[in-house]
Each structure stands twice: as structure tokens, then as C-alpha cells.
């Protein structure tokens, strides 16, 4: 993860000690655990961190200073303003209402540092460019002006359009830094880097564009133990609703891995992709439905395996995403808490 951050920082144009890449640490560092990931990213050199929810602030502040942390969803409620002021974390202002609410209550009498999100075409969160001349925006003390790319993982004309619109907006708002690119945006080249990038997925081993494939390493590995073995006779059915029926005598293993761990049913036989767990290079096909806590595998090709032996779950994100109906983002964020070491 540290080497992924350093690679993304260099691709973001860092030439001196000043970091050019921040880090999106929302959703518990994309499911991998903030207490594991955040110290690694901080020690690698990241200084700007982004969460989505106010509820994510407490965990992050165990590892970083409040003024290094931004909350992307912004001060939607009056109590969010009070919480930002009391903790010292920085809200991202996404609307004129949020701007007024922050100025009315931010930093005791207004004027507290904030970031500003401009919507350049994703139509999700952010101020419309036409609203930047509003007095509510002029009243803000903006540290980072940012926008978010909608299709950076594709070769889409939308990327250049958003870039142009973002550039056109910058003179309208006094700010210290400008920030546009997520992981895929970094791969679009130096025009998209501005002062600070905000990678998330690629820090954790996701590869949203082929340009990043040489620089980004897998960070998440998933292993699960065989907790019982048994012999099936012809006609024996496996798991809920008996979706697999043995045609011949066969030895199978029950593995401690299920949908509560993020191994969703779509990664099992119902996903239709000949799915398997692995012992080294040996593929052990999954049999029957994925349960909450268990799956069953065919041990025919690994007669030496028994109770207590470990199998690996494919977690190379670009490959795994191709073999199931989940995106690389989802493969990470669905991981169950009890799988984290
Ligand atoms: C999640 C998020 C990011 C990180 O995006 P990745 O595609 O995971 O790199 C950056 N900026 C904003 C505003 C986000 O919401």
C-alpha cells in the first residue's frame, strides 16, 4: 500500500518532499480497515485524507491530525457544523445551503477553513459553476477547490470536458490548492493532476486503467480454512436447496467463508463462472450455494488436504472483477470485518 501511494504520488507530479497525492480513506479504507491502512499511508507520506461520512471521523483521528482530514459529504445538518468546529476536521462544501450553514456556524462566527466541491458533470455532489459567483461562496475561506471525474476509467470525451470546465471555474474562487483526479484520473496524465490528487482504489490494489498496471500492487489477500471434510455418495446434495448433487463418490471440504465475509453468492456457482478456491495452483471447484459462513469445495484434486488447511480466494482485483459481477471497488468494500487481520 505504501509503494502504491508512492507510485501514485510520483505520477501526480511530485518532484520534491511536498506530497501531491492525498488518499481517499472512506468506507474504512475501502473495506480493508482504517487502523491497518491509514498509518501505512501516513507513514508513506500522505498528508491529506478524505472520508465520506461524519461517522468516519473518529476512527481516522486516531492516526492523523484533524486538519489533514476532509469530510466529503459536507455539513448537511447544523450538528455537522458543530462537530467539524469541535474536532477541527475540514468540511467539503457541496451546495449554497452548506456554504451558508458553514459560514453561520463554522469556526465560531464563520470563516473556518473549508474545501469546495464544484460539480463539473457527475451531477452528484457539488456546487454548479453558475453558482460560484454567489455571495455565499465569496464568504468562504477555501483551502482546496475540487471536482470529481465521472468517467476517468474510460476513454471518454467527458474527461476533457470536465477538465476544461474545472479550469474555467478556478479563477472564480480564491483557494490554496486545486484537486481533480481520482485513481483513474491520475492515469489520464499531468494535465489532470493539479496541486493534489485523491486516489482511493489504486492505493488498495485496484487498477482502473491499464496505464496503472505496472505501478500498482495487490494489497488484499484472502485466505479461508477448511473446517470439515466429508465423503459424498451419488445422489447426496450440498448446501441450501441442494443445488449441487454428487454423481459419484467424492471427497469435499467445508470452508469457513461465506457471504457475510463478502464472498457474495454471485461469486459461487450461481454466478456461472466455474468458480473455485485455490490450494497453490490447484483449483478446487465450489459446490452448491454460498452460505452466510461456509462454502463447500471439491477436494478431488487435493486429496492431501484436510481440516485446518488453508485455501486462498482469488483477490487480484482486476482479474477477480472479470470473473464475477462485482466491480473492483465492490470486491474490496464488501469484505466482512471478521476477515480483517
Ligand atoms: C471516492 C472518491 C475518490 C477516490 O476515487 P477512486 O476512484 O477510488 O480513486 C476521490 N474523490 C472523491 C470525491 C471521491 O468520492
Image: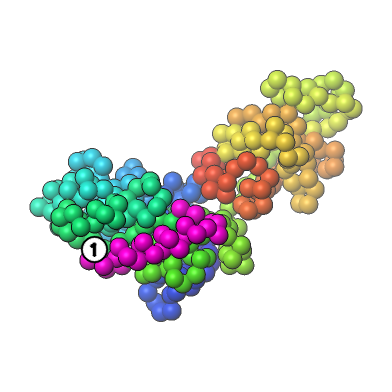
Closer-to-camera residue (76/306): 76
Q: Position of residue 212 (x, y in %)?
A: 58, 64
Q: Is residue 81 visible?
A: no
Closer-to-camera residue (334/327): 327
Residue occupying the far left of the picture: 109
In the rendered image of this protein, does residue 42 appear above or below residue 338? below
Which residue sits at x=56%, y=34%?
260
**Hey, which quadrant is residue 135 in on the image?**
bottom left
**Hey, which quadrant is residue 335 in on the image?**
top right
Q: Is 278 left or right of 64, judged from the image as shown?
A: right
Q: Residues within 10 Å of mark 1 (few under 14, many from 20)?
A: some
Which residue sits at x=46%, y=72%?
190
Query: Is residue 58 one of those drawn in magenta?
Result: no
Which residue sits at x=32%, y=55%?
118
Q: Position of residue 248 (x, y in %)?
A: 90, 27
Which residue sits at x=40%, y=56%?
148
Q: Is residue 245 visible?
A: yes
Magenta span: 150-177
Residue hosting label 1: 173
Q: Is 304 left or right of 195, judged from the image as shown?
A: right
Mark 1 lies on a secondary structure that is: loop
Closer-to-camera residue (32/128): 128
Q: Quadrant of ligand 1?
A: bottom left
In the rendered image of this protein, does residue 4 appear above or below residue 222? below
In the rendered image of this protein, does residue 291 appear above or below residue 100? above
Q: Position of residue 324 (x, y in %)?
A: 65, 42
Query: Is residue 160 one of those drawn in magenta?
Result: yes
Q: Position of residue 105 (x, y in %)?
A: 14, 48
**Hey, which quadrant is residue 234 in on the image?**
top right
Closer-to-camera residue (297/62): 297
Amino acid at each position: 500500500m505504501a509503494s502504491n501511494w508512492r507510485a501514485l504520488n510520483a505520477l501526480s507530479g511530485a518532484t520534491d518532499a511536498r506530497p501531491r497525492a492525498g488518499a481517499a480513506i472512506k468506507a474504512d479504507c475501502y473495506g480493508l480497515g482504517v487502523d491497518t491502512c491509514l498509518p501505512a499511508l501516513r507513514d508513506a507520506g500522505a498528508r491529506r485524507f478524505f472520508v465520506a461520512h461524519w461517522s468516519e471521523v473518529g476512527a481516522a483521528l486516531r492516526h492523523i491530525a484533524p486538519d489533514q482530514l476532509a469530510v466529503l459529504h459536507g455539513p448537511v445538518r447544523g450538528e455537522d457544523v458543530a462537530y467539524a468546529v469541535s474536532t477541527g476536521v475540514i468540511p467539503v462544501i457541496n451546495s449554497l445551503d452548506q456554504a451558508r450553514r458553514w459560514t453561520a456556524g463554522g469556526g465560531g462566527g464563520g470563516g473556518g477553513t473549508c474545501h469546495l466541491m464544484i460539480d463539473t458533470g457527475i451531477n452528484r455532489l457539488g456546487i454548479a459553476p453558475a453558482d460560484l459567483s454567489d455571495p455565499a461562496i465569496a464568504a468562504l475561506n477555501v483551502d482546496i477547490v475540487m471536482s470529481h471525474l465521472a468517467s476517468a476509467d474510460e476513454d471518454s470525451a467527458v474527461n476533457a470536458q470536465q477538465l476544461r470546465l474545472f479550469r474555467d471555474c478556478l479563477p472564480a474562487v480564491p483557494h490554496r490548492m486545486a484537486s481533480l483526479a481520482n485513481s483513474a484520473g491520475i492515469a489520464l496524465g499531468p494535465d489532470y493532476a493539479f496541486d493534489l490528487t485523491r486516489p482511493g482504489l489504486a492505493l488498495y490494489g485496484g487498477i482502473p486503467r491499464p496505464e496503472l498496471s505496472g505501478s500498482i500492487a495487490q494489497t488484499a489477500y484472502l485466505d479461508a480454512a477448511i473446517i470439515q471434510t466429508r465423503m459424498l455418495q451419488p445422489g447426496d446434495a450440498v448446501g441450501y436447496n441442494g443445488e449441487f448433487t454428487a454423481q459419484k463418490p467424492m471427497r469435499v471440504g467445508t470452508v469457513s467463508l461465506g457471504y457475510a465475509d463478502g464472498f457474495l453468492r454471485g461469486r459461487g456457482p450461481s454466478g456461472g463462472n466455474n468458480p473455485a478456491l485455490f490450494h497453490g495452483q490447484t483449483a478446487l471447484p465450489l459446490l452448491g450455494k454460498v452460505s452466510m459462513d461456509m462454502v463447500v469445495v471439491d477436494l478431488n484434486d487435493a486429496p492431501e488436504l484436510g481440516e485446518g488447511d488453508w485455501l486462498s480466494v482469488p483477490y487480484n482485483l482486476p482479474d477477480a472483477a472479470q470473473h464475477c459481477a462485482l466491480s473492483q471497488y465492490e470486491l474490496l468494500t464488501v469484505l466482512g470485518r471478521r476477515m480483517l487481520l
